[in-house]
């Protein structure tokens, strides 16, 4: 049995930015396909119905459209990342997580929470983050750089795989 692992997390906006940025880009790609389908439908219905599209390509609207795309792709992910970090970290600069056989203990300045393994609904991993989803839509975000060594990270993965109630999907590698 592996002992508990204590991690001091200093979550930053940059840790989450690429997660939200890639999601925004994915949404823009889906929007592009939906726009293409709508335009194909309008062309199929008749060219007299798509005359308004020419007005959309004139400079005032085109600049607004480009500004909206830049906002959705660049600014909105930053704002979401900043809001998540402020909500998660509060006024403290560090967050302490103890992961062990009994569950996950999270300590901040002035508060403490315990999550049994039954409350952990899913755990995912990106190239720089570990995400543990607990009851509902909240997640515990732990940057991989906060682990003291790769062995400590591997021990964390083993604890999650051993005690989690969900089916852990392990690819050939965890980035």
Image (cartoon, grey):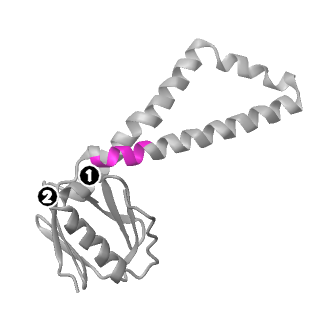
- Residue 50 position in % (x across, y down): 79, 24
> Magenta part mainly helix, strand or loop?
helix
Query: Based on the displayed image, in which of its 4 quarters is residue 7 positioned?
Result: bottom left
Label 2 Cα crowd, 10 Å radius (few <14 / some 14-19 / many 20+): some
Nearer to the camera, 7 or 170 = 170
Compared to 40, does 87 lie above or below? below
Farthest-out residue, top: 59
Q: How many marks?
A: 2
Q: Relative to 12, is 153 above or below?
A: below
Residue pointed to by mark 1: 85
The residue lying at 88 percent from left, 32 percent from top is: 45
| Residue at left offset 37%, top offset 44% | 18
Q: Position of residue 103 (x, y in %)?
A: 26, 81
For the residue pair 120 and 61, the one nearer the viewer reads as 120
Q: Is residue 127 left or right of 31 when viewed as pictured?
A: left
Query: Residue 133, percent across and down?
Result: 38, 68
Residue of label 2: 94
Please give the range of residues in magenta.
15-21
Task: Quadrant for residue 52, please give it.
Answer: top right
Check the image and report above or below for 22 versus 95: above
Quadrant location of residue 171? bottom left
Whichever of callouts 1 and 2 sits on the residue coming sooner in the sequence is 1
Query: Depth check: 152 or 68 in front?
Result: 152
Q: Which residue does the image show at 22% across and 62% down from the upper left?
A: 150
Q: In this view, does 101 lie above or below 35?
A: below
Residue 127 image position (x, y, % from top left): 35, 52
Q: Is residue 114 left or right of residue 168?
A: left
Query: Considering the image in quadrants, where does the N terminus appear?
Result: bottom left
Indicate the secondary structure of the residue bearing disc 1: helix
Mark 2 residue element? loop
């Amino acid at each position: 049995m592996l002992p508990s692992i204590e991690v001091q997390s200093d979550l930053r906006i940059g840790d989450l930015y690429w997660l939200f940025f890639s999601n925004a880009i994915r949404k823009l790609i889906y929007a592009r396909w939906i726009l293409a389908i709508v335009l194909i439908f309008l062309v199929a219905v008749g060219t007299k119905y798509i005359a308004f599209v020419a007005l959309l390509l004139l400079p005032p609207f085109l600049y607004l459209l480009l500004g909206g795309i830049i906002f959705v792709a660049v600014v909105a992910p930053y704002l979401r990342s900043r809001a998540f970090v402020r909500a998660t970290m509060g006024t403290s600069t560090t967050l302490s997580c103890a992961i062990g056989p009994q569950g996950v203990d999270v300590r901040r300045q002035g508060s403490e929470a315990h999550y049994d393994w039954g409350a952990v609904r899913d755990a995912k991993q990106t190239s720089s983050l570990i995400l543990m989803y607990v009851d509902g839509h909240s997640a515990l975000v732990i940057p991989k750089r906060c682990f003291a060594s790769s062995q400590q990270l591997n021990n964390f993965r083993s604890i999650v795989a051993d005690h989690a109630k969900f089916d852990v999907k392990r690819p050939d590698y965890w980035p």
